[in-house]
Image (spheres, rainbow, N blue to C red):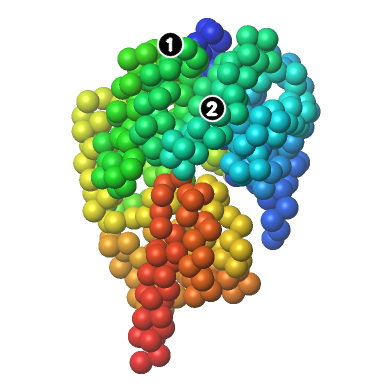
């Protein structure tokens, strides 16, 4: 069966399944990226209709653009057969200047082995509030410069990715007439559709974001359709709502179908690092079956059941890393969601064994957190990381005490 495609604002067809180059495969027993496997996976996706590839200078320890560019070139596919998206990821204060920001753009072209970027994004525009947005993109003239590069053809489509601050999103909507955003990337899934603001008061629900973009006919790119993989893993509370409708469907397919049901969605990004996930996701989108009204109602119930378990909204994006004290923050928070939420019933010994597996001794654990807070400003989900890690540490100490009794 054929891949489902949608149209970009310039009419070019783009696969509804897109590849997010944030979580490259690594060699067994190593943190080293496996370039041979990356190339094999990229070639498989191209052969099966995936033609949207999203990256950033900040992804995969700064290696994402270079490795993706090499893999796409080696694939043998012509440059105009796929869409390359990357970002102005000028997060550090020393990168705020126009000179340093333009240098990031030029480096992206070099690393991606191309002379133009199909889709260029102002990266994570709401993270840090409007003041930070202004310093990164307005005071240095970078929004206008990017618009000039679009007019010159070095950028084909200009957009932004959004996290958090409502004032920043509102500014972009108010200035759509001036900048003519070609697309926008938002976090959207059946949890955040109507619950993002309930999870964190600084958030905006995906239904609101989508609605504002739809009103202006701005195509939507979806990030975190699986919430960092949390919606792909079996969850008993969710399964109780969805399994009766289709016992054979995977958890991931439900999440993808939800996003693809909305017509302004241009592409849905998935950070696929294992071939079996790529194969499964390609099958889900070839073609993608939109959700019925009954299925959307079941997903709404599933979202309520999921939130009742009180999970942390960690999507394992790794923006909090590296920790200056060596903690594996995403692993610690993932362990918390997998073993310490209210729907989980494990014996103390089982939980401690899982902790040892998720966070090995050589990776510093929760008890080494100094609460320095350097991670907090980088978290797109606005988690108070030191506070949550301290709570996990207290639970682990209590469980150790139970086992020793």
Pointer 1 or 2: first along the chain: 2
Q: Specify few, some or many for label 1: CA neighbours under 10 Å numbering under 14, 14-19, or 20 or more.
A: few
Above or below for 224 versus 321:
above
In this rendering, does residue 68 appear at all?
no
- The x and y percentages for residue 232 are 42, 45
> In the figure, is residue 72 to the left or right of 201?
right
- Location of mark 2 (residue): 138
Q: Secondary structure at mark 1?
A: helix
User: For the point 48% across and 67% down, which residue is it?
Assistant: 371
Quadrant into which the C terminus falls = bottom left
Q: Give left or right: position of 68 versus 290.
A: right
Depth order, front residue of 242/170: 170
Residue 177 rendering spot, x and y as whole percentages: 43, 11
Q: Quadrant of residue 395?
A: bottom left
> Would residue 332 appear left or right of 88 to someone viewing this image?
left
Label 2 sits on a secondary structure element that is: helix
Query: Closer to the camera: disc 1 or disc 2?
Result: 2
According to the image, label 1 marks what residue? 177
* Residue 67 seen in the current view: yes
**Residue 110 tag number:** none
Q: Considering depth in this image, is 316 or 82 the residue closer to the camera?
A: 316
Q: Which residue appears at 29% of the width and 56% of the height?
A: 310
Question: What x and y, as percent, mark residue 32?
Answer: 73, 53
- Whether 361 is drawn above or below 113: the answer is below
């Amino acid at each position: 069966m054929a891949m489902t495609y949608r149209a970009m604002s310039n009419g070019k067809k783009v696969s509804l399944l897109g590849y997010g180059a944030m979580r490259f495969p690594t060699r067994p027993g190593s943190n080293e990226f496996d370039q041979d496997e990356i190339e094999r996976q990229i070639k498989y996706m191209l052969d099966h209709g995936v033609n949207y590839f999203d990256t950033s200078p900040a992804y995969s320890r700064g290696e994402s653009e270079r490795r993706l560019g090499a893999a796409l070139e080696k694939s043998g596919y012509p440059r105009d057969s796929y869409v390359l998206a990357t970002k102005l990821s000028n997060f550090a204060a020393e990168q705020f200047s126009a000179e340093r920001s333009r240098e990031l753009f030029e480096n992206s072209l070099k690393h991606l082995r191309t002379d133009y970027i199909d889709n260029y994004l102002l990266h994570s525009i709401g993270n840090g509030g409007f003041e930070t947005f202004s310093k990164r993109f307005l005071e240095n003239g970078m929004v206008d410069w990017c618009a000039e590069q679009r007019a010159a053809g070095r950028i084909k489509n200009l957009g932004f990715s959004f996290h958090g601050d409502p004032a920043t999103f509102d500014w972009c909507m108010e200035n759509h007439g001036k900048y003519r955003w070609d697309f926008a990337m938002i976090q959207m899934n059946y949890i955040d559709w109507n619950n993002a603001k309930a999870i964190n008061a600084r958030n905006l629900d995906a239904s609101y974001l989508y609605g504002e973009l739809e009103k202006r006919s701005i195509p939507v790119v979806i990030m975190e359709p699986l919430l960092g993989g949390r919606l792909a893993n079996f969850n008993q509370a969710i399964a109780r709502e969805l399994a009766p409708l289709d016992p054979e469907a995977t958890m991931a397919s439900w999440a993808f179908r939800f996003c693809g049901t909305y017509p302004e969605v241009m592409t849905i990004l998935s950070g696929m690092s294992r071939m079996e996930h790529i194969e499964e996701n390609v099958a889900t989108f070839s073609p993608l079956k939109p959700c019925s009204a009954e299925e959307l109602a079941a997903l709404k119930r599933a979202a309520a059941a999921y939130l009742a378990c009180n999970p942390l909204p960690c999507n394992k994006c790794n923006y909090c890393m590296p920790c200056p004290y060596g903690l594996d923050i995403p692993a610690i928070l993932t362990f918390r969601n997998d073993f310490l939420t209210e729907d989980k019933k494990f014996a103390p010994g089982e939980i401690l064994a899982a902790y040892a597996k998720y966070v090995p001794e050589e990776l510093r654990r929760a008890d080494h957190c100094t609460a320095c807070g350097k991670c907090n400003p980088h978290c797109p989900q606005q988690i108070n990381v030191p506070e949550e890690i301290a709570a996990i540490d207290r639970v682990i100490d209590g469980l150790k005490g139970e086992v020793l009794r």
